[in-house]
Amino acid sequence: MTQNEKKTPVDVLVTGGTGKTGRRVVARLREQGVRTREASRSGKIRFDWADRNTWKAALEGVTAAYIVPLDASPSPTPAFVEQAVACGVERLVLLSARGVDVPGYFGASYEGEGPHTEGEAAVRASGVDWTVLRPGWFAQNFSEGVFLDGVTGGELALPVGDGAAAFVDADDIAAVAVAALTEDGHKGEVYELSGPRALGIADVLDDIARATGRRASYVDVDDSAFRAGLVAQGMPEAEAALWADALMPIRTGREAQVADGVRRALGRAPRDFADFVRDAAAEGAWR
């Protein structure tokens, strides 16, 4: 048996099964014939981080689990990991984030032990096979996420200056997750995930304009104006502060570093942002 020969588990639980990475993980697993349990707050298999009574039913009979954690402190991930191991789960793949182990990577809202750090510590100490995925900013934030309205509205205002990021395609994240869930050779690995090149926000909008004919302008704003804009849209001040601080690694250039996780896990280069834009445009993302 080669190192990465597939050993299909009896059942894989995907938490956040309707989210950006979760639904892609579910689709890939099912394409491979893996019995997959898609769990979410509104799905057929109900799973709610805030309701521990939903955890056991989601975990029963499962041999591997993809964990999309709740971004809250204290993190419920350690308790979930304990429950998963007690239910017989043998393999855990955790979605974390780039920079969680780098002091000062994010802003003040993220100082100290955060939910990702707590989750990583829990899977490491679980006693079962584990893999940690640390993606940077998702390319899909421009097509189905927080930046979409700015793109379609013609003006994207962000407090990132002339910073850049190697935006990672969520399809690559899902591909790495599926490999870690179904193959040998990923035990104890921490995969830093990024795209193959760094782009500034103006570069991103140029790529989208070339593919769609829809051009949006990038406007650099300061943190206070950005937060005030989010609050004016109804976002709580604390959450607005988290968003602003989460963007700091783009402003400082830390997200510009190209990581090798996709190549290490899959043996190929990550998808280019232009390829993501082409496919998203064909699917009608910015119509």
Image: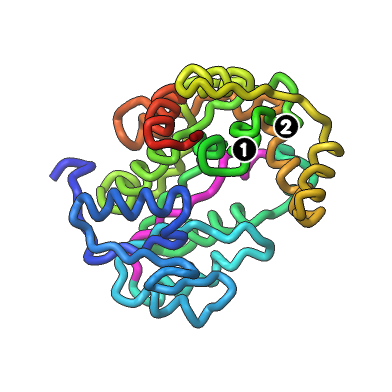
Observer able to see residue 136: no
- Please indicate whether residue 252 sits to the left or right of residue 33 in the image: right
Check disc 2 and give the amino acid type.
Answer: Leu
- Residue placed most toward the observer, 153 or 248: 153
Residue 54 x, y percent position in the rendering = 47, 78
Q: In the picture provided, is 196 more to the left or to the right than 257?
A: left
Identified at 68% across, 32% down, the residue is 249
How was the colour assigned to the protein in this rendering? rainbow
Tell me the residue at 32%/48% (across/down): 178
The segment highlighted magenta reads 89-103
Horizontally, residue 160 falls left or right of residue 175, namely: right
Residue 214 location in percent, x, y?
Answer: 55, 24
Q: Amino acid at mark 1?
A: Phe
- Residue pictured at 46% horizontal, 43% vertical: 190
Q: State which quadrant residue 280 falls in.
A: top left
Q: Residue 247 in the image: state x and y as whole percent.
A: 69, 36
Q: Quadrant of the N terminus?
A: top left
Mark 2: secondary structure: strand
Q: Position of residue 227 (x, y in %)?
A: 81, 43
- Local packing at callout 2 (Cα closer than 10 Å; few below 14, some 14-19, many 20+) is many
Disc number for residue 244? none
- Please, is residue 245 above or below residue 114 in the view? above
**Which residue appears farthest toward the bottom when viewing the image?**
53
Q: Which residue is mark 1?
A: 147
Report helix, strand or loop for mark 1.
Answer: loop
Report the label total: 2
Say the numbered circle drawn on residue 158: 2
Q: Main secondary structure of the magenta part?
A: loop
**Mark 1 residue crowding within 10 angstroms, few (<14) / some (14–19) / many (20+):** some
Q: Residue at x 40, y 76 (%)?
A: 86
